[in-house]
Amino acid sequence: MRGKTALKVIIVACCISVPGLLGCQGRAPLSAVAESTDTPDTLSDDAQVESEDTFAFDEQISDESLPIIADELFDDFVFRFDLSARLQRARVRFPLVLSQANGETETIEQREWRHHALFLGQDFCTVMWNSRSQMALSQDTSVCEARVEQIYLHSRTINVYAFERDSTDGLWMLTRMADLPFEHSELQDFLDFYRQFATDSTYQRQHIREPLRYTTIDEDAEYETIAGTIDADQWFEFAPELPQDVLTNVNYGQDYPNPNRMVLQMRGLANGLQTLMIFHRNVSGQWQLTDYEN
């Protein structure tokens, strides 16, 4: 995928760490969120779809449980969950708890549930990692908790959908939702940087390290990898179209111990194409794009 056609990608970037949303593999369980007095809006209307039974794949997915193989990987489950209203009703643990940033909670009963579009009709999703090695988590069948985070850059709020894999039958279930402000994320600094980077071309150019390391695939040479460098002006010839309002992050349990490195991955939902953008924070505290892989 190249240049402006690179919409179907995953951005690897500085990821959101929401305390207490992941509970397996030694992490703390999901707990009531927050102590902020600033309560963000409830889950965005963009994430909810009024028509409940007119979505792609509904005819292909019955009300019965998915085959076990479809639940081995979170990706196998969540992309179908996103599309199917019937599957959502079968895989939400009701009454579902929605936590607000001020510490208040409300519950959603089954009769109140409306289809939620986790990926908001996009043909790609963005995933945030702290290192390349973490990317193997998306193919790890031992992952038992995961979440989808809808990051609204301009309102600086995050809608969180927390999932658990049942230890008895192995089925993924949506077990909790939360509304969070950026202040509840240790990555708020990077997210605020990214918002300006994605929307301001002058600012973007100023935050590209020169020379920028660039890796791509040579389609004319049996898909061999080509590695080299480009300058900031050339960047705009190769740059993907960056999401400017909403990032949809999938968290498989990755954490972010290095606050000075972010890997932003854009991944196509249907074709597996991806783009990586790697950012580092320099000694003066400024974020820079240092590596681009297409």
Image: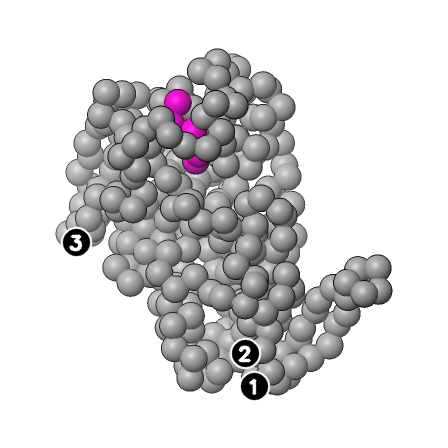
Q: Are marks 3 and 1 in contact (CB under 8 Å)?
A: no
Q: Nearer the viewer, mark 3 or mark 1?
A: 1
Mark 3 residue type: Asp
Magenta stretch: give its range.
82-86
Residue 92: x, y in percent? 36, 24
Is residue 216 in the magenta section? no
Question: Which circle's residue, 3 or 2, is located before the other in the chain?
Answer: 3
State the residue position of label 2.
Answer: 236
Pick the quarter of the image with the C terminus: bottom right
Q: Main secondary structure of the magenta part?
A: helix
Q: Residue furthest right?
A: 221
State the separation of the CA atoms marked 3 and 1: 41 Å
In the rendered structure, the answer to whether residue 160 lies left or right of residue 69 reads left
Q: Residues within 10 Å of mark 2 (few under 14, many from 20)?
A: some
Q: Residue at x 75, y 72 (%)?
A: 227
Residue 100: x, y in percent? 22, 42
Residue 158 seen from this side: yes
State the separation of the CA atoms marked 3 and 2: 38 Å
State the residue position of label 3.
Answer: 38
Q: Residue at x 71, y 67 (%)?
A: 216
In the rendered structure, the answer to whether residue 285 lies left or right of residue 237 reads left
Question: Which circle's residue, 3 or 1, is located before the other in the chain?
Answer: 3
Q: Nearer the viewer, residue 281 or 111?
A: 111
* Element carrying mark 3: loop
Residue 28: x, y in percent? 42, 37
Mark 2 residue type: Phe
State the residue position of label 1.
Answer: 233
Residue 157 sits in quarter? bottom left
